[in-house]
Image (tube, grey):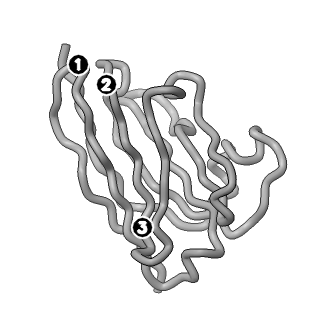
Amino acid sequence: QVQLVQSGGGLVQTGDSLRLSCAASGLTFSGYAMAWFRQAPGKGREFVARIPSSADRTDYASSVAARFTISKDNAKATVYLQMNSLKPEDTAVYYCAADRGFCSTYTCRANRNRYDYWGQGTQVTVSS
């Protein structure tokens, strides 16, 4: 049984930092691309960042590039999202996701429908 268990998140102020974690079990973690998505109230789930199984590149939504960093530790089967310089518009429920496939384009990598497994979500609230 595959599980993605998220931790981190919470209430912070503008400019603060947070780190989200997502621990995977029940799958061969090193063989999966991992990603983070987020969903703000009244909006759809949007792509935030992705790191492939090879970890030889990362992709970010333009709204978070240069502020957020995705990384993973295969030994711990955990993916992280370091979020710096947080803004109120970053307020959302954040989800980690796992994809066993390969993507050659950003559009593919950002497509939430291709992900096989999802974490339970964690709330991030940034106050102004």
Residue in the foreground of this view, choosing between 54 and 47: 54
Q: Are marks 2 and 3 in contact (CB under 8 Å)?
A: no
The residue located at (17%, 23%) in the rendering is 13
Residue 77 position, x and y percent, is 45, 74
Disc 3 versus disc 1: distance between alpha carbons? 27 Å
Q: Which badge, 2 or 1, is on the more N-terminal residue?
A: 1
Query: Is 85 placed left or right of 115 in the picture?
Result: left
> Could you classify mark 2 by the number of other residues whose Cα lies within 10 Å: few (under 14), some (14-19), or many (20 or more)?
many
Q: Which badge, 3 or 1, is on the more N-terminal residue?
A: 1
Disc 2 versus disc 1: distance between alpha carbons? 5 Å
Residue found at the very far right of the displayed protein: 104
Q: Are marks 2 and 1 in contact (CB under 8 Å)?
A: yes
Q: SS at mark 2? A: loop
Q: In this view, does 42 lie above or below 110?
A: above
The residue located at (44%, 35%) in the rendering is 68
Q: How many labels does the image show?
A: 3
Q: Quadrant of residue 61?
A: top right
Callout 3, which amino acid? Thr
Residue in the foreground of this view, choosing between 56 and 43: 56
The residue located at (78%, 61%) in the rendering is 102
Residue 120 position, x and y percent, is 35, 60
Q: Which mark is residue 86?
A: 2
Residue 23 position, x and y percent, is 37, 69
Callout 2, which amino acid? Leu
Q: SS at mark 3? A: strand
- Residue at which label 3 appears: 78
The residue located at (75%, 65%) in the rendering is 101
> Could you classify mark 1 by the number of other residues whose Cα lies within 10 Å: few (under 14), some (14-19), or many (20 or more)?
some
Callout 1, which amino acid? Thr
Q: Which mark is residue 14?
A: 1
